[in-house]
Amino acid sequence: MEYDLNFSWTGTIGHVVIGATRADGGTRKTSYTLGGGTSLPYLDNNPSSPSPLVALEICDNPEFWSPIIRRFCGDLIHSTSDWAKTAETVYGADLVRLYLTSTRVRNFSDIVSVGKTIESVLDATALPLIIEGSNEPGIDSDVFQKCGETGQDERFLLGTAEASRYRSIAAAALAYDHSLIAQSPIDVNLAKQLNILLREIGVQQDHIMIDPYTGALGYGLEYSFSAMERIRFSALKGDTDLAMPMICSAIDSLNIKEVREADPALQDEMAMQWEFYTGIAAAVAGAEIICVRHPKTVRMLKNAFADMKNNAGFSGVK
Amino acid sequence: MALKALDIYKLLPKKNCKECGDPTCLTFAMKLASGKADVDLCPYLDDQAKSVLGATTRPPIRLIKLGVGERSFAVGEESVLYRHDKTFYHPPGLLFKVSDTQSAEEITAATIRVRDETLTRVGTDLRFNGIAIENTSGSPAVYAHAVATVEENADLPLVLIAKNTEALNAALIQVGSYQPLIHAATKENFREMCAIAKKHNCPLAVKAHGLDDITSLVKECLAEGVKKLVLDLCPQSLGNYITLSTAIRQLAISRAVPDLGYPVYIDATHPSLQDAAIALGIVKYASVIISPPLSPASSKAALTLRQNIYTDPQKPIQMNPGLYRVGTPGKDAPVLMTVNFSLTFFTLQGYLESSRVPCFLLIVDTEGLSVLTAVAAGKLNETLVRDSIRKFNVENEVSHKTLIIPGYSAPLSGMIEEATGWKVLVGPRDAAEIGEFLHEEWKK
Amino acid sequence: MRSVTFLPSYRKVDVARGSTILDAAQRAGLNINVVCGGQGKCGKCVVFVQSGRTEFDKQKYLRFFSEDELSKGACLACETTVQGDLKVFIPESTIIQEQKILVEGRDKGIEFHPSVRKYYVELQPPTLIDPSPDLTRLLWGVQRSGGPVAEKIYVPLEVMREIPNLLRHSDWKVTGTIALVPGGYRLIDLQENDTSKRIFGAAVDLGSTTVVVYLWDLVSGKVVAVASNYNKQISCGEDILARVNFARKNGLTKLQTLAAESINVALTAASNTAGIDREDIYEVVVAGNTVMTHMLLGIDPAYIIAEPYVPVVQRALSVAASRIGIAGNQNCGLFAFPAVSDFIGGDIIADILSCGMSKREEISLLIDIGTNFEVVLGNKEWMFSCAGAAGPALEGGEVLFGMRANPGAIEKITIDPFTLDPLYTTINNIKPRGITGSGLIDLLAELLSACVIDRTGRINTGIENKRIRTGQHCPEFVVAWASETDIGKDIVITENDIKNLIMSKASIHAACVILMKEAGVSRHDISTIFFAGAFGNYLDKKNATIIGLIPEIELDMIRNIGNGAITGANLALINRRERKALDEIAAKIAYIELNAEPSFMDEYTSSTFLPHTDLTLFPMVQQLLDSCRLRKG
């Protein structure tokens, strides 16, 4: 006998495409289609629905980066393009997420350099890219414009729109056909509000990924987990304003006390486990891109995701 | 599905007789709806109404207790699929697994770790819960010796894993009265296993593949008179586990298959996916999780994840209000004010520590609300700040009168200045920028 | 002593040197607007000193005045002390305006049947043949004149003592006053000759900021005067909480006295207007919130405001007015409305009475908005209630140019969607000084329709229009240029103002939803929404719906009941059956503590959007906004 769990879902998670191959006019070796889920994560019984992707986060000014990563990566971090390349070739990431931390220096104005950095990363890796723009309203417009322009035809995922600043990034995404990350602070309602705001200025549902803001394990994951579950739940119940795939990045993981103050000999493992446990929980709650900063977390997560996708053995569930 | 107060009210006699202790039938109905009153308090309910009201309150998953004494723990009695619907009540037990073929030193070491290791987070002590002892040797005597080794070192809840009933009997002679979980009854051996479990009145794990097999095995064990059951789904993969445990939870709480209303057991032992299995067990409904002794990093992560998932997501964890120190601040150190939502506190504290600027952190009582919501709800206001400065003697600690407030409370800055007489600096909205802020703004 | 003469009324008082102008004005019977309770915070008590010596720290309060005002001697009445003899001009906007008060009991077809009446009787003197006792003789006379059955009338000892002499002295022509009190009928007063036309009653709305009194002729059933006055307790604390704290520090007696005095001032004013003697007031009915009622009766309110928030009394109370210092006839009775909880007090019971929701089969939603808000959902069978803090934004507080409904306040606004030029009307049609709550609601709805703000209330600074600019702290929209205003400054609404307004409206909407969920009803089940409180008649129902202040229902089914507290008090004064129903209403209401409601924050967050995060709850608004946007392109 087969049991039907009868959740009576009516909604489907919408699709978002990241990366464009030569066939699509871009230069990436692959392009990912996220979304499409029709049930709770891993209950789809649909072999074609994708496993979560793992993105390795890198940056172009390591001054703003965790000392743990600076130490682990050594000289690598001084060359953004080499760093991006190893993400693909050595650590096996699905995506590279580039933080333009160079723009966070006070009175930053060298917009041209932004384009150059992105170009060098596009040359160094064939993976689809997530580009994280500026953090400063004053230069947002120029930075996002430059990101959009440099990545024309590559279908970037651009970060990050928030309720307080979404117009510049949306303009760049619309002009150059990129998707964008819509981040709201750990709340299903706020996530929905931002999606409505974006829809109302013309950003299509298939160009938005929800970032529900992921608190690190022990530092907010207890709320993030449920916020993600509720977003997925509402989407499956038919709320199209929440029916976008989710991206999750627990960026505080390497700054929290447990990791920062760990015995130096154990620090890398602590960082990896912290990112790993967070990533597993986020994937189960519905995240489809998991971002990490420790290069060694990438493979751990990918191995686990492969086995989570494998529903071997008879379960008796329809 | 829980009934609304008004639905319940319609079933009540509407006499407003006050005999239940409530002033009106409506207020009694509200208490019933939120589970704060018992149906039997109303003397005028007919049996039909009682059965309708009673059926919604019986827990769909049985409560099972492992072990005796201080370290015993209970699992089950969960009622929701999503923790945001209510909350998850009984955190899973995390147990270290040893084998009777291991040396006494190894067994002792694992036992002592479970006995002594404590991780204190947010004012709570987090610990592993017990020891699972596997009869790998096949010998009853060796097994009994291993169990004795554990028992000599600690009074911990146990799981006895053995296919050999003689080995089990040998172990249970020593520890049978301590409510160990016996693992496991299968299609082949359930009669003997049930007899043993009944004899010692211990909980019993039933082990089968697939929902049909596990359901029929539960029925057999119930027929044998064993009611304290735990389900081992023996999943073939992590994906298989997610499907099975979600199905069991859903079928149990919807009361579609009441025989699946028992806690779930998972053995996370795996050469490379052990941490993934533990994490999945915690987030996806496992109640007993066993694994070989974990590394320090995995231990911390697993205990923390369990604490996170079993925290009520609707209730913020609160810090005690007060004046906290970061580093050893002097008289001229900055004073930063924020709310007593624990998450805000820890995040800010983390960034402050990494900024290496010694300072004071003034935590005011917003009943656990975050800055944004506390400002919105009026809980964070100038009076609270003024009173907190007085109450915690901030003026005696520092030689200046400048207060840094969170970016999201900027609208209050003028009123705080006026009420306290302190100069107010509006800090960043994002805690991550506090280091830079202190270096740039405070040093000026 | 120094004398202070107030213009334009030429009222004059003598006060001690060093008193504030505010004190002097209050002693002169002028009701000055002191929102902050006279702490120099609100800047609403602006007066102009025309001559004489004062002390006032201009520099400290510079922000409240324009250059022009300062040159004319502007100062704050609460912060200025009298040093010499003064002439002080009080502008109209500084005086508390009498609220436009709505619906009188008679208009609603309520039968005039007061609880207290007078009976004039001419009695036969006793003789040897008819030797029945004085009392019997009197009560029989009352019964014959249409009064209650003689045996049912109780006569207190004080009145009994008066009877023998009074009857004989008046040549057996007397007027008796009979009141219906909880114990039955009671002869409360006896006067010589025919005074039966001289009987008046007062209905009182005892608010924490203002006191409103309606004086009724209890023979003709007509209102003879209306007066209002600020609540003198303001000097002991701005809000309820501060006053309860004041009471805790042995201040209860003072608060009791001030409450009674506040009522007395209004009673006197009303009596003077109507040209009647206060001695002829025989009954006072008071509807006030729970804390106010406790304080007026001199009952310790301390336990109401701390967990578990228990009031001392919930039922209606009848006491002798003289015992709590209310000036009327010496035997005047006072009736105080019952309460349900800390927040659901007599004022809300009065709202319920005046909107009639407790008599209806259909479900109604009642919303009373002030600094706090109260919401009641229900019908004749059941009622749920809750209350919370709305913040003062909807009353015009915490908004840069917000103000109460005084002259010069913008109360209605429309905005041209293309030019973004506003069209507004002000109270008394004078140049604008600020914006009222109803004006703010209009403004929010219009700015949203014109796409100046997005649904979170953020101003789109990308729009090229001179009215949209970045102010000192955040973006703002100019509603009126300095040249068109009465204050010589641009009147603007800032993004922070808008956020405050959205927070206020979100709390109210969330509270409505919590009650609806508790009762298991949807917006389709609500037949009528009643609005009471701060907005009076002026609230634009459509705009209130557009911003999501209330659940969306047919606009025709939204009604303003204005000051429901005074209407309810009026009803209870003139109709004894309505009054009898009060305890029953109070007992029927179940109170829900929002703080203990785990889903409140969730409902609140989903309401912090215009109109709401779940747009399907506002189909009409959605359609309207879509068409606005379509037109705009």
Image: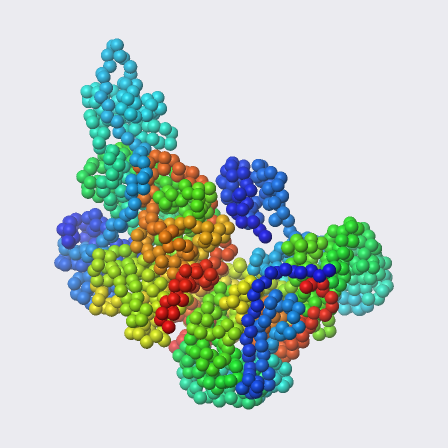
**Residue C222: quarter of image:** top left
x 55%, y 65%: residue: A235
x 24%, y 69%: residue: C481
x 47%, y 49%: residue: C592
Q: Is residue C631 left or right of residue A300?
A: left
x 86%, y 63%: residue: B139
Q: Is residue A161 left or right of residue B243?
A: left
**Residue B252: quarter of image:** bottom right
- Asked if one can make out residue A226 in the rendered structure from this viewpoint, the answer is no
Question: Quadrant location of the C terminus of chain C?
Answer: bottom left
Q: Position of residue A199 (x, y in %)?
A: 46, 71
Of residues C219 and B145, the one nearer the viewer is: C219
Q: Is residue A166 left or right of residue B311?
A: left
Residue B164, relative to residue B347: is it above or below? above
Q: Position of residue C217 (x, y in %)?
A: 24, 36
Question: What is the basis of the colouring in this image?
Answer: rainbow
Residue C47, relative to residue A19: is it above or below? above
Of residues C194 and B94, the one nearer the viewer is: C194
Q: Position of residue A48 (x, y in %)?
A: 64, 74
- Asked if one can make out residue C164 in the rendered structure from this viewpoint, the answer is yes
Of residues B347 and B57, the one nearer the viewer is: B57
- The tally of labels here is 0
Of residues B412 and A225, the one nearer the viewer is: A225
Q: Position of residue C355 (x, y in %)?
A: 36, 45
Residue A248, relative to residue C72: is it above or below? below
